[in-house]
Amino acid sequence: MRKEFFLNAALLGVLLAFPLWAWSVDEPYLITLATRAIVFAIAGIGLNFALGFGGLVSLGHAAFFGLGGYVMGVLAFHAQTYTPVMGWPLVINGTKSMPTIWLIAIALSALLAVGIGALSLRTSGVYFIMITLAFAQMLYYFTISWPTYGGEDGLSIYVRNGFPGLNTMDPIQFFAICYAILLIVLAFVFAASRSPFGLALGASRQNEERIQAVGQVPFRLYLTAFAISGAITGLAGALFADLNRFISPTMFSWQTSGEIMIFVILGGVGRVFGPVAGAVLFILLEHTLGGLSEFWHIYLGAILLGVVLFARGGLYGMVAGREVAHD
Amino acid sequence: MTEPILDIRGISKSFGALRASNNINIDLRAGEIHALIGPNGAGKSTLIKQIAGGLRPDTGSVHFDGQDITALSTAARARLGMGRTFQISSLAMEYTVLQNAVLGALGHRGDVFRFFRPVMKDAGLLATARASLEQVGLEEFHDARVSELSHGQRRQLEVAVALTLSPKVFLMDEPMAGLGAEGSHRLMGFLDQLRHKAPILLVEHDMDAVFTLADRISVLVYGGIIATGPVEDIRGNPIVQSAYLGEETAA
Ligand SMILES: Nc1ncnc2c1ncn2[C@@H]1O[C@H](COP(=O)(O)OP(=O)(O)O)[C@@H](O)[C@H]1O
Ligand SMILES: [Mg+2]
């Protein structure tokens, strides 16, 4: 318990101290690197809610990451070009307001997750993995063939969206926004993991017969978890798009789904802070190994294999041991 | 005679060529322990599954509290007031004893879709859970993980979780298996009192326990009930003797 607490604090501390140091020595690139880690962490926290707490192995979370990205892209594009997103039956205009974009990204991602979940949660195991993957691939090909927003080439948004009172084009200020969101998301997931819902969802993952015997329906728990999971990953997608000021169908690709899953597995499936550790580790590896060889993914694959075979709890499992029963 | 609270009418169930339930009629009335006995493979657990949900009978119906519940899900039946224990313990293995009991209390209270309060600090749920654990004698094992418990302790926990549901009937599939002499004795004393709270349909191998506890006994052989009646009738019934008791408790 104490070890886990220290690891959490250390992670959050380093994630804050490193960009502040980079800022003090005027290295905006490193600030952006830290921001990337944070956005990835949020995406991973989203997946972990379904995968770790609910046992729902989704290989299609790029669907939500991409949707969040395209919500940002589409709204900002229309604000940029002074054209309505939609003129009929009701007029919807674009926006350059981050909070508005986030809320819409969250709502639409949750809605998409309910849709995908309603169709896929009747299955389990390999079927569930394949169906979630298939939905993300559908969206991937759809965006490729949709010329309005750049098709295959993607779409650039030249000026980062706005947040009241802040200059979002300043890397450290945009970092601060993402860091604050990470804290809020972590606080929510931490609370939810100890809540009535968390207890019931975990029981359902362990033994569906048991949760039914106490009068609860696994499907409803899973669907709710999947919606929350999608919403969080969708929010990360919107932030990622704003970080790069660019969206493309790659956000929907199965490689993106795979990377989000890697954050979760590296850090520790089912641990609240696991994806934060996983995303930081991923960025570190990408940065160090990526500098050594352009085939760094091979090394990443080897490390991943090692984690899956020998350290199933990921980094958190290795350092902090088995999860303590919360009380 | 009072209306039965649980009334099974003409249930049949086949697995391929095997007739696991053959036109079974059985009921459970307020205040009684109705024991269901029969050799291994007779279809006792299969019958319990059809009553509790999770296995749909081919024909026949299940009536509970005056309502036909044949089409209802397991969860819906549990909410109506069926408390069940499994022959092979079915618990949340990674959770502690107390968490499993709180889960029962939570499932019963029904407000599962809450995301902010810590569930293990909920005084109401904790009180229900602790009281139930105490009744089965697990109060010293609150913090043990289920995976660390002995088989017997898991059976006790099954009963405790069923208690947290404050059910209208109990369906217990061999709750004493693996308990040992002392544990069995304690559980027998407890069930003896429990019947006054809610009647119990009790599947049990231990003949001594059955003859001591039961108000009525039904004997199941090859999927069919060959006799139902008060203890004395069953003990003296020649068909039962040759079909089952004669083999002298193969269990
Ligand atoms: N799901 C199933 N599929 C096929 N056969 C089953 C199934 N469940 C039980 N059986 C068979 O039905 C018979 C009755 O089993 P069961 O109800 O477990 O007996 P009991 O509880 O009386 O020992 C056994 O022969 C068993 O093998
Ligand atoms: Mg059985």
Image: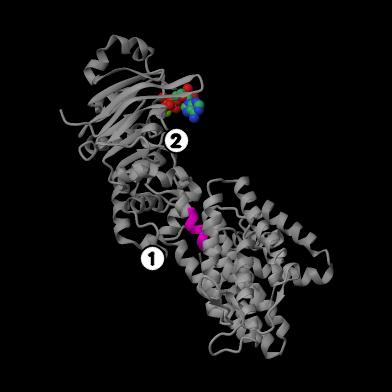
Position of the C terminus of chain A by quadrant: bottom left
Establish if A319 lies above or below B83: below
Position of residue A159 measured from the top left corner of the image (x, y, whole percent): 66, 85
Q: Residues within 10 Å of mark 2 (few under 14, many from 20)?
A: some
Report if residue B9 lies within the magenta region: no
Q: Residue at x 56, y 45 (%)?
A: A123
User: What numbered label is drawn on residue B88?
Assistant: 2
Position of residue B72 measured from the top left corner of the image (x, y, whole percent): 37, 40
Establish if B248 lies above or below A224: above
Q: Amino acid at mark 1?
A: Arg
Q: Which quadrant would residue B39 be assigned to in this image?
A: top left
Establish if B71 lies above or below A59: above
Report if residue A227 lies within the magenta region: yes
For this orientation, the residue located farthest to the front is: A88
Q: Amino acid at mark 2?
A: Ile
Tell me the magenta residue range. Answer: A222-228
Q: Is residue B213 left or right of residue B22?
A: left
Q: Residue at x 54, y 90 (%)?
A: A165
Q: Is mark 2 within 8 Å of ligand 2?
A: no
The subunit carrying tag 1 is B
Q: Which quadrant would residue A210 be assigned to in this image?
A: top left
The subunit carrying tag 2 is B
How many numbered marks are there? 2
* Residue B22 visible in the displayed image: yes
Which tag, 1 or 2, sits closer to the chain's start? 2
Q: Is residue B114 left or right of residue A157?
A: left
* Residue B185 visible in the displayed image: no
Position of residue B88 measured from the top left corner of the image (x, y, whole percent): 44, 35
Q: Which residue is mark 1?
A: B117
Position of residue B191 measured from the top left corner of the image (x, y, whole percent): 27, 36
